[in-house]
Image (tube, rainbow, N blue to C red):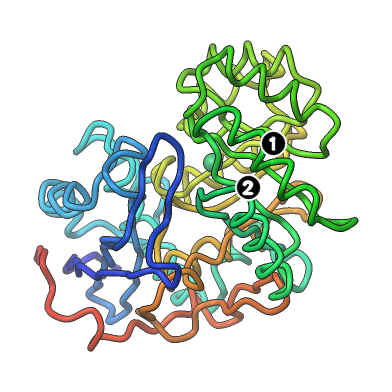
Amino acid sequence: MKISKISAYRVELPLHETTYKWSGGKSVTLFDSTIIRVETDAGVTGYGEVCPLGPFYLPAYAEGVRAGLRELGPHLLGADPRELAKLNRTMDAALKGHPYVKSGIDIACWDILGQSAGMPVCELLGGRYAEDVPLYRAISQDLPAAMASRVVGYRAEGYRRFQLKVGGDPDVDIARIQAVAAVLQTGDRLVADANTGWVQHEAVRIARAVRDIDVYIEQPCLTYEECLAVRRQTPHPFVLDENIDGLDVLLRAKADLAMDVVNLKISKLGGLTKTRQARDLCISMGIAMTLEDSWGGDIATAAIAHLAQSTPPEFLFSTTDFNSYVTVSTAEGAPQRVNGRMAASRAPGLGVVPRMDVLGAPVVMIG
Ligand code: MG
């Protein structure tokens, strides 16, 4: 089987909440997502999706996905999409870095492998654990009372895990954590995610101020070293995210005892193949994970669900249903949230059928 054509579609994904705000005054009102279609000479077609969280979250931006595909795509024509390790080596040889560009192609090729084998991707990624997986809800940055009331609302929809977007003014952030903690119930989990937004001394002070609250602290500062310094001064369980973009830093963080949980995003690492490698290493090292992506719609959510569902439940801290945040559906068959949980499709591959009328005309065509 050979890759015969690679296309990409640009889709705009508005938010039900109209805007999503996080640290440092950053916000997004409309997500710019790229859906990648990989066709083969055997008539099997796979789909992937890459959707950066704006151009200022990770070193990735939406138009960069398309530009990168135009550069990378011609090198992949004729390759066997089912030989995923080999395909990833070919991508890394043809384009240095830019993991997010490669992610959508890798996901689409897992979709093809699954369809070819007649197996859902989660079974190929290691096996289907449990019936479904627990979701967290990201709570967009707002005034403390507004964030607390949003948690109450999402709790009523079934979510039990909440990730507060902090990383703002330290005194307001302390109030945000306190206000939300006050409305939680036994069994709920709370994460305060500063998304690199605190200066080191502020992070230490905030962690001290909430030391009696049952809360995880996620990625308080910009650099790994700053986060490690904070980690060593706080009793809270600790999550690293933005800094963990490959195996080198993951191994270093394990050696430094720098985290209790790590957030692995598929496009941050460069696709399902590389995220699976990091995921399996974390399982061997005893590190639990939030498994997700930077953002996306139905196809990204399907890929996330297969990755999460193939992870032992005790190591799956949480995952995300991004398709429920946005108002546009790009595919049939994607996971749908039920009582704060979702399940990967049991159909072969990712189990999604794109809505071509929503995708429109391709903006990238190779082959
Ligand atoms: Mg995070």
Residue at 55 percent across and 66 percent down: it is: 321
Looking at mark 2, is its residue's CB closer than 8 Å to ligand 1? yes
Q: How many residues crowd mark 2 within 10 Å: few (<14), some (14–19), many (20+)? A: many
> Nearest the camera: 17 or 103?
17
**Among numbered discs 1 and 2, the one appearing first in the sequence:** 1
Q: Quadrant of ligand 1?
A: top right
Q: Position of residue 269 (x, y in %)?
A: 44, 40
Q: Is residue 161 visible?
A: yes
Outermost residue, right direction?
A: 186
Report the amino acid beneath label 1.
Val
Nearest the eye: 363 or 340 = 340
Q: Which of 317 and 110 lies nearest the eye of the viewer?
A: 317
Q: Is residue 339 left or right of residue 27?
A: right
Q: Nearer the viewer, residue 81 or 47?
A: 47
Image quarter of residue 228: top right
Q: Which residue is mark 1?
A: 261
* Coordinates of residue 44 in the picture (x, y in percent): 32, 78
Crowd around label 1: few <14 · some 14–19 · many ≥20 (10 Å): many
What type is the residue that disc 2 sits on? Thr
**Is 203 drawn above or below residue 21 in the view shown?**
above
The residue positioned 72% from the left and 35% from the top of the image is: 287
Q: Secondary structure at mark 1?
A: strand
Relative to 238, is 359 above or below? below
Q: Distance of mark 1 from mark 2, alpha carbons? A: 7 Å
Are discs 1 and 2 less than 8 Å apart at CB? yes
Q: Quadrant of residue 356?
A: bottom left
Q: Residue 149: x percent and y percent?
A: 66, 62
